[in-house]
Amino acid sequence: MTTILGLTQDDRSLFWRQVSRGSKSAAAAGATLVGFASAFVPIVPSVLTIALYISGVLAVCVASILAIRNLLIYTRRAMSDMDRFARAMVKIYSDYRPRTGRFDEIEEICNIGKKEVGPDHVSAETLRERMEANPEVLQIVEKGEGLDTVLAGYTVLLPLKALTTRRILSGEVYRGFQIKSPDISKQYTNAPSLYISIIYGRPQGCDRAAMLINLRERICEVVRSSKNPPLIFARPGAIRGRYWMNRVGFTPIDLERSQIWKLDADKVAEIFH
């Protein structure tokens, strides 16, 4: 489904139906009257012709006024809905707190990952090596539950060097496990590409949604602080992951040779601004 400015084709169709409500009939009536007047000018250039012209112009003006009125009403309602949605989101996610993961948490994180994600989860040794290359790759989100703080989920986002980016695009690197510590940049700012290695959120409440919001905020921060938006790489896991990557605009690098998908820089700039 085509998406422009965040609106799908169905969204835009609904928008134009709302804006043109009532104005279509007035515009059609005005055009008909003007058409009749134009047809009668060479035959009966009389008061009737002038009256038809005036009536037609007035009908078109009424149509314009109705369209502007509907546009203002629709926009006000949409902004009100967005404001209510934003307030609800703030209330829901006010208990979530992101922070950078620590080295002493690696074993616990990977044990959870192996149990919940499966054998495709990165090993503790590999995650440790990646954190030694860049200590900020592991981001943990915690949630307050009463007086306790519990794990809501975590993400591993890798900033990659230019050579590694080219190797992924050429198909030389075709799995995330091939990315080693020398491939990881020490800084996120101006990194040529990012690799979404892991997104894990507990299947309770809004934890998974909180993880996606946190990941989006991290990528937005990189985009805002960089001269050029980076490419984003990821590997679709389950069917749900493949569905959402398709929706966002990820495309496979090579269906036969590579498991990695990419999101081009122009799409990154459009989505994560």
Image: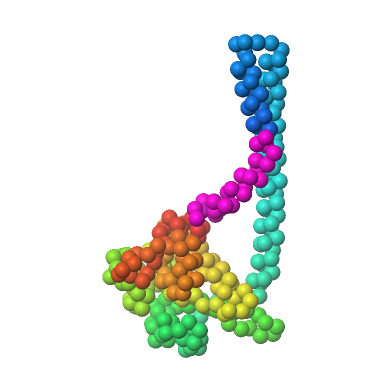
Instruction: State the residue at coordinates (40%, 62%).
Output: 251
For image coordinates 67% across by 82% down, the residue present is 145
260 with respect to 10 (left or right): left
Whether the magenta-drawn stretch holds residue 18 is answered as yes
Q: Position of residue 15 (x, y in %)?
A: 62, 47
Residue 103: % across, % down: 47, 85
Q: Describe residue 180's horizontal placement relative to residue 199 as left or right.
A: left
Residue 230's x, y, as percent? 41, 62
Is 5 rendered above or below residue 220? above
* As drawn, 102 above or below 74: below
43 shown above or below 22: above
Q: Is residue 126 above or below residue 11?
A: below
Residue situated in front as seen by the camera: 109 or 130: 109
Count of numbered marks: 0
Left or right of residue 21: residue 209: left
Asked if residue 127 can be seen in this view, the reply is no
Q: Is residue 134 visible?
A: yes
Task: Report the front residue among 55 and 92.
Answer: 55
Who is closer to the viewer here, 3 or 239? 239
Q: Quadrant of residue 196?
A: bottom left
Task: Locate residue 217, reporting x and y percent.
Answer: 54, 66
Magenta stretch holds residue 65: no
Residue at 50% x, 55% y is 1
Q: Magenta span covers which residues?
A: 1-25
Q: Residue at x 57, y 80 (%)?
A: 202
How did the renderer colour the structure? Answer: rainbow
